[in-house]
């Protein structure tokens, strides 16, 4: 399997959109939802640490998407170390032709963790 690395922009939830017929491209990092007040967040997106990439088989068919974990911190509201629960997911959309809008192809589960204001939540990249 080979990987084509594609860049993204950084904030909270990674949303991967791959165009399956022309040249696959990825657009990512769209905040889907939030509850209450949120802390600082970002997505690492620089060479060689791209935020999202599409995985292809030897025939050039896309076989998956890998999404880099976001960096999510709790709100800093006190002089001490604050913590809070966070969640993230990614959504893969596809566009079958140039005349239609992208449709949801896959929606990942929501992964939850605890974040602190001085340390991001302990998350892992997902495929």
Image (cartoon, helix red, strand yellow):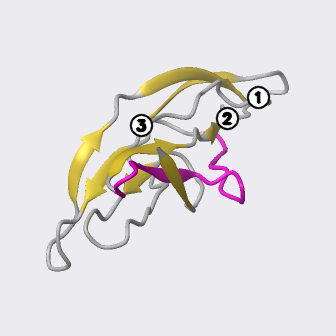
Q: Which residues are magenta?
A: 39-60
Location of residue 101 in the rendering, given as x and y in whole percent from the top left corner: 19, 69
In this rendering, position of residue 78 left or right of residue 107: right
Front tag of 3 and 2: 3
Q: Is residue 1 above or below residue 24?
A: above
Q: CA distance from mark 3 to mark 2?
A: 16 Å
Furthest-right residue in view?
A: 79
| Residue sitting at x 42%, y 37% | 89
On the image, numbered disc 3 is attached to which residue? Answer: 89
In this rendering, position of residue 4 left or right of residue 63: right
Location of residue 94 in the rendering, given as x and y in whole percent from the top left corner: 25, 59
On the image, numbered disc 1 is attached to which residue? Answer: 119
Q: CA distance from mark 1 to mark 3?
A: 20 Å
Q: Secondary structure at mark 1?
A: loop
Q: Are marks 1 and 2 in contact (CB under 8 Å)?
A: yes
Name the quarter where the C terminus is drawn: top left
Q: Nearer the viewer, residue 21 or 109?
A: 21
| Residue sitting at x 66%, y 31% | 74
Q: On residue 73, which mark appears?
A: 2
Mark nearer the N terminus (1 vs 2):
2
């Amino acid at each position: 399997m080979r990987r084509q690395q594609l860049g993204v922009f950084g904030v909270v939830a990674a949303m991967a959109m791959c165009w399956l017929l022309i040249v696959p491209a990825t657009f990512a990092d769209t905040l889907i939802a939030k509850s209450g007040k949120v802390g600082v967040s970002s997505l690492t997106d620089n060479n060689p640490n791209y935020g999202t990439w599409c995985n292809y088989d030897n025939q050039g068919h896309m076989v998956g998407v890998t999404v880099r974990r976001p960096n999510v911190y709790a709100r800093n509201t006190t002089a001490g170390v604050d913590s809070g629960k966070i969640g993230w997911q990614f959504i893969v959309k596809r566009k079958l032709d140039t005349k239609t809008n992208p449709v949801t192809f896959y929606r990942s589960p929501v992964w939850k963790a605890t974040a602190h204001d001085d340390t991001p939540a302990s998350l892992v990249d997902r495929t």
